[in-house]
Amino acid sequence: MKIPIIETDRLILRPLSISDTDHIFNTWTSDTRVTEFMVYTTHKTPEETKEWLEDVIRHTDDKSSKSIDIGFQLKESGILIGCGGAYYKPEYDRWNLGYNTAFDYWHKGYTSEAMKAFTEHLIEMGIKHFISSHAVNNPNSGRVMEKIGMKFDHTGSYTCCDGRIFEAKFYIMDSE
């Protein structure tokens, strides 16, 4: 699914590329502070990040894909500070929203700013129903969800790729 460049006051949201591999690895996919509650495991090598990016790009280029990812780049410096995405979850008939931001850029409003603009773009594309979750022990992620207009729906859990299970809060948003 093709995503255009989206601009906010402080950010440029853009497609990710293979050339981002080393930066992403060094900035967030290898940082346990960032990956602690993520469904993916902390990347040990840049090759793991490259494989993930190859998958992201493959889905972006596939017009029938039910997965969309976008990078968060600072306008002022051009530094890529994180990424977000949405993928369709048929069991909920909703698009799941997720995001990562490099640790040095936490608590500055960048993730909320990026995800609000990204979600507005998805709504313009005709995607109307969203779900997202965060580990109970990661309440800052819940604040991002609330800032973009999501509402608490239920508690549950999610399982990570390595088998870790987190108690979670789930949020939903309907644009209709």
Image: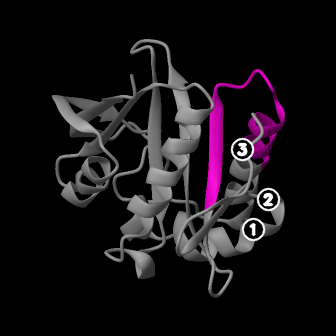
Amino acid bearing label 1: Asp
Q: In the rendered structure, are the residues bearing label 1 and label 3 in contact, judged by CB atoms less than 8 Å apart?
A: no
Amino acid bearing label 2: Ser
Q: Kindly indicate whether the residue at mark 1 contacts the one at mark 2 (C-beta within 8 angstroms).
A: yes
**Residue positioned 41% across, 29% down in the render:** 130
- The part of the chain drawn in magenta is 54-71
For the image shown, how many numbered marks are present on the structure? 3
In this view, 100 is above or below 64: below
Q: Residues within 10 Å of mark 2 (few under 14, many from 20)?
A: some
In the image, is 82 to the left or to the right of 63?
A: left
The amino acid type of the residue labelled 3 equals Val
Q: Residue at x 73, y 44 (%)?
A: 3
Badge 1, how many Cα within 10 Å: few under 14, some, many 20+? some
Considering the image in quadrants, where does the N terminus appear?
top right
Q: Position of residue 152 (x, y in %)?
A: 18, 35
**Residue bearing mark 1:** 20
Say which of 136 and 14 sits in front: 14
Query: For this view, does 156 lie left or right of residue 120?
Result: left
**Residue at the spot of label 3:** 56
Specify whether 51 is left or right of 124: right
User: Mark 3 vs mark 2: which is more N-terminal?
Assistant: 2
Q: At 22% across and 36% down in the image, what residue appears?
A: 151
Residue 72, given in percent of the width and then of the height, sits at 59, 65
Foreground of the two, 4 or 70: 4
Q: Which residue is mark 2?
A: 17
**Tag 1's secondary structure?**
helix
Q: Is residue 103 left or right of residue 4?
A: left
Q: Position of residue 111 (x, y in %)?
A: 43, 63
Q: Quadrant of residue 74?
A: bottom right
